[in-house]
Image (tube, rainbow, N blue to C red):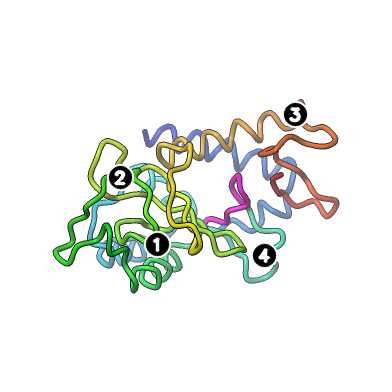
Amino acid sequence: MNDGVDTAWARITAWLHSHTPITAATLRSPAPADDIRAVQDAVGRPFPDDLLAWWRLMDGVDDDTDYRNAFTLPGVYMPLPVTRARDEWASLSAYPDQDCCQADGQHQRAAGDATLGFCTALLPVCRALDGAVLALDLRPGTDHGCVMDWMAQSGAHRTTWANINALLTDTAERLDNYPTAAQDPPNPGDPVIRDDGALTWT
């Protein structure tokens, strides 16, 4: 699986450097091992290998200078730096979903199941400007490690991505198809290069 992450991320970064260097410049260097250990200790659950492999390749995006140019995944989600993933998890976990999260750390619902509130076994890895997050579902079950979409108003729901590897591979394929898929207007979910040279998504 790690080979898949390495390959997909190499395709993504090569495309960015070729087509939208202004967005490529917002990618941060690999996450420090100490930061990764700190978020693992805070969450207290094992992380999927593909997430760890991705964090060893990059530490989110630098959106402090100009968030409008920051690299995003489909749906316009910015990858969080590892320290911000820990902060997001801590903030959202302060009010756990009472219908799922139990005091002993167990969960009443399995990985991939929808929740109304925020489940403490969800690890935010990307954030949109509207406050929505993409989170990995660390609850037990056959769908452990799947990508969930969470918003305060609607709770958490499973996306089409089974894991980080699937998310990155799908992103790479959409970018690779850009020259032939580009049209006016673009299809929903297509990458778009804005007039200022930055990547966005329809």
Real-space CA distance between mark 4 and mark 1, rounded to the nearest whole angstrom: 22 Å
Of the residues tagged 2 and 4, which is closer to the observer?
2
Q: Quadrant of the N terminus?
A: top left
Write down the residue under mark 1.
32
Q: Amino acid at mark 1?
A: Pro
Q: Which mark is residue 111?
A: 2
Identify the element where label 3 is drawn.
Answer: helix
Q: Residues within 10 Å of mark 1 (few under 14, many from 20)?
A: some
Q: Amino acid at mark 2?
A: Ala
Real-space CA distance between mark 2 and mark 4, rounded to the nearest whole angstrom: 32 Å
Q: Residues within 10 Å of mark 4 (few under 14, many from 20)?
A: some
Q: What residue span does the magenta drawing correspond to?
A: 72-79
Identify the element where label 4 is drawn.
Answer: helix
The residue depicted at 85 percent of the width and 51 percent of the height is 195
Residue 77 within the segment the image draws in magenta: yes
Real-space CA distance between mark 3 and mark 1, rounded to the nearest whole angstrom: 37 Å
